[in-house]
Image (cartoon, coloured by chain):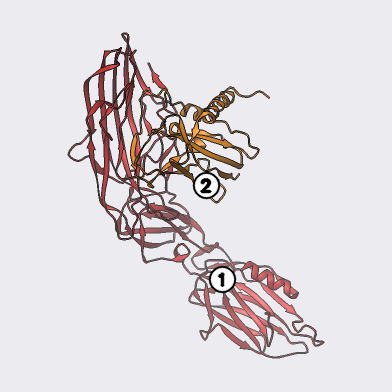
Amino acid sequence: MKTPGYLARALILLSIEVAHLAGAQTTDGVLRLDITPPNVPIREADFTLQVIMTNRTTQPMTIVKTSPGCDFSADVRDAEGQMVPSTPAGAELSKCSGRVATGRWIRILLQPGESTEESYPISLYYALSRPGVYSVRLFRELSSQPGRVTRSNEVQLKLAQ
Amino acid sequence: MGTLSRGAFTQHRQSEYKFPRVGAFLNGFPHQIVLAGFLVSALGLASGSNRASPTVTIQQVHEVLQGAAGEFEIKIDAGVRSGPITLRINSDVGTGRATFEDGLTEKVITESGGVYVRGVTSSDLPGAMTLTAWLEGANMPAATCFFDVIAPAPEPRIFLDGIDVTGTQQSVVVGQRVQLTVILHPSVPIEKQEWRIGKKGEYTGGFLHTPLLGGPQPTVLEGSTTAFYWISPGYNRTVSYHLRLTNGVTATAAVTFDVDGPSSTQVDVDSERVVMDPAALNSSVLGMMGSGISFRARYFLPEGVAKNFIWVQLIQSDAITVDNNGVRLHCVPKTQPISSVGAGLDTTYPYDTHNPTMDNPRIRLASDTQEYSRVLHARMFLLWTSGLSNSIPVPLGFVDWSFSGEVALKDAATNAWELKSGYVGPNNPVMPFKRAPIYPFWTRLVPYTEILTCN
């Protein structure tokens, strides 16, 4: 069976992205990312993860919210541990490094211990088309420390038929 | 109801079992009315006894009308054993109520004969009422007959969450799901059922919000059930149900709502001036000073109501012009699906859930390009949600605002640019916020990736 072209491209992009994440240093103690999975099987075709970002330092921290596809990277795996490819739309939506124009731009000053919420429409970026259990972890680069990323807890998503 | 009857059958050794009798005509009802009267009798209740127990049968002779008496025939084949038999009228579920002629629901008989049952309130569920016959000391009825109380004319009742709210005044909050149902007896010959809900624009059937598609949903106004959400506060709003039968008979029922929610909402808009971002060292950025344009909601909320505000921004157009060595390109951010003017939902739903929120659209300026300009028109919606389960956000109003900037390259070596013009602010500086219960509606997403569509 031939792999569709868009799927092959998505897998290549995903591999590059994961390689990028693997090369980045994780700094979980600075900005904490928490994802809370729903405790019931997901039935909606469009599903959004809620992310809570908490300043764990003793200093005020500025973060900027733009596009979730640019602000976060994700490691999404199926029940066999295989990486789930991006959707064609998701692959395009994650092309951010050469952005010329930005839209949404929200600058937030987080005091020590303070949190802010963000949405991550995971089904827009990843092909969670089959029912089953998926593990998800999010990563975000620290604007104050370029090249260093913080990672979220890993959650299990149960997709019902 | 059904379970009860089936259970009774299996626990008795039946000698007779007749299926429901069908086919009585009622005044004003041209169609057949199904009477759910059927008969059960039992033998040998005195288990272990060598004496034969009497056989009891109940047969409905005349239907039970609301406000009138129906007739049942009780036959007792006494056998060896004899004694009083107690008749009982029960209503396990539904609205149907009936009594014997003396107003009681229990009657003792000693011999065969007719009994009259008076309909008090009409049945909404078929076969939900029973007339049972009990031998002395038995823990199971010797016979059971299911029947209905038929209304001479339909009297619809409106139920909200299983409670009869017909003619009452209910208090809800905007965005709270309201599901109203009318249950009619299946024999009622319905031609049309219709709901009338306040004024158009005061309610919605739902609010869809996916990245690629969003907006209000239609309300189903025909049929026995409607579900909707009030989207603006108000008092004495009437929801009425209108029934029309095939014989031309009509009936109505109504319920009134007091709807609470945020009021006196305003949004203050503050905007910084357009600048080249001084924070950018190696690459220049056209944007706004500081936090850019900010939107702060002011409101009055009823006591005990949460401050759950939601911002949603729609890009109405976003035109970027690039002059590169004399070649002028007219570009828009690539949208999904493609829009010629770069319109759609800005980045994600919701845009933000904090108050105030802000925006600062930017352009990164490359030194191999001589001129850039950007003209962006956007509409920032303010919504509110109660946070109740089964509730949806409701719109409070919006701010139309614009950003424009035009820059020219001064020095490619240092990536120095000159700001030729710049404006940012609400389109109506005097009254930036338009209070209106209008939902954002989009069929495209403007994700603001690195891709521009140019021509």
Which residue is under mark 1?
A: B148
Q: Chain B in the picture: what colour? A: red
Report the side of B59 relative to B342 (left or right). Answer: right
The answer, for residue B227, to whether it is visible in the render is: yes
| Quarter location, residue B257 | bottom left
Report the side of B205 relative to B420 (left or right). Answer: right
Report the side of B23 relative to B421 (left or right). Answer: right
The answer, for residue B154, to whether it is visible in the render is: no
Q: Position of residue B452 (x, y in %)?
A: 40, 21
Chain coloured orange in the rendered structure: A
Vertical placement of residue B188 versus B341, above or below: below
Q: Give the letter of the chain under mark 1.
A: B
Tell me the amino acid under the disc marked 1: Asp
Look at 63% across and 79% down and name the residue there: B132
Which residue is under mark 2?
A: A37
Q: Which residue is more in the foreground, B313 or B286?
A: B286
Q: Mark 1: which secondary structure?
A: loop
- Return the residue found at the far top: B326
Q: Mark 2: which secondary structure?
A: loop
| Quarter location, residue B36 | bottom right
Q: Determine crowd level at label 1: few under 14, some 14-19, many 20+ residues with C-alpha closer than 10 A.
A: many
Q: Which residue is more in the foreground, A111 or A18?
A: A111
Q: Which residue is more in the foreground, B111 or B139?
A: B139
